[in-house]
Amino acid sequence: QAAKPNVVVLATGGTIAGAGASAANSATYAAAKVPVDKLLAGLPELANVAKVSGEQVFQIASESFTNEHLLRLGQRVSALAKQADVDGIVITHGTDTLEETAYFLNLTVRTNKPIVVVGSMRPGTALSADGALNLYDAVTVAASKDAAGKGVLVTMNDEIQSGRDVSKTINIKTEAFKSQWGPLGMVVEGKNYWFRAPVKRHTMQSEFNIDDIKALPAVDIVYGYSNMNTTGIEAYGKAGVKALIHAGTGNGSVAAQAVDSLKALRAAGVQIVRSARVPDGFVLRNAEQPDDKYDWVVAHDLRPQKARILAMVALTKTNDSKELQRIFWEY
Ligand SMILES: NC(=O)CC[C@H](N)C(=O)O
């Protein structure tokens, strides 16, 4: 029998490492409690799929992830991916910002080896806990040759999703992670079934490399709504942001009073990225606002929180708005 592939599980916390007071607590519990060794010991079925080792990188709820956490995690994933004795990497993560970390790794880790980010909606102590199967699925995908070169993946609820496209869409229920473009495939009983592949640049075809990124620039998000005031935009400008993501209404529309504030920020050198607060669809250049005239960038189909990740990564290489727009089309 051939030796099983080597998979490293990097644990960062979240509900998948959560514990509640009783089995009825599916929503009230403490996240980031169970250490990775205990998580792995509780799942002896993993040995059928791979030779698994665990490493506790952080033990936090994912809403508290900072840029420093992203950089440290990315550097560790990159170092492991270079090791000949590592075939795939799994990252256990809280679900709240899982999509941001997955996209960050997708943009910056130069490898074809499978990288899978996974979480759970219920703690392991709850009835119908989903973490064990999600983790088993993640290790299955990370151990598979057929998962190579597909970018960073997310396994939740039996589906294999692209880390670029996927978002958390509901805060209760296990079918929380969706993409408007659909999952790439499914993982069932330790086997992958693929139906599509990503077309955007990622990992091995990326022009970005975590090994060269020492810090990420300040990029923040302002939310559009009726009767919007411009206090937030101006405060971010004063705080010295390098780019501001506008989470606009509808097709990325911008309130008249906010247009003036954003134009003033752009004139002061801040990059303006026009995205939309609606969950699906995409923002068209020069529709709703004259992006060419204002020298703004549009976020394509990226949600504001993903546009922030790409803007930070892109700004480590260029501050040219045309280049930024090219990057937003390509990644
Ligand atoms: N389901 C979860 O993982 C949410 C728990 C926590 N808020 C986190 O993101 O880490």
Image (cartoon, rainbow, N blue to C red):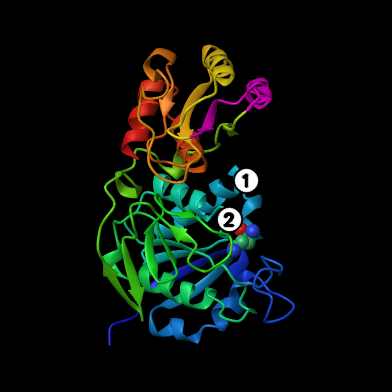
- The answer to whether residue 316 is seen in the rendering is no
Q: Is residue 249 above or below residue 131?
A: above
Q: Is residue 116 above or below residue 68?
A: below
**Residue at left 57%, top 83%?**
42
Q: How many marks?
A: 2
Q: Residue furthest front?
A: 226
Extent of the magenta region: 227-249
Quarter holding residue 154:
bottom left
Position of residue 291 in the picture relative to residue 37 (left or right): left
The spot of residue 302 in percent (x, y) is: 42, 41
- Mark identifier at residue 66: 1
Task: Locate the C terminus by quadrant.
Answer: top left
Q: CA distance from mark 1 to mark 2?
A: 13 Å
Circle 2 sits on which residue?
96
The spot of residue 295 in percent (x, y) is: 42, 17
Q: Nearer the viewer, residue 304 or 68?
A: 304
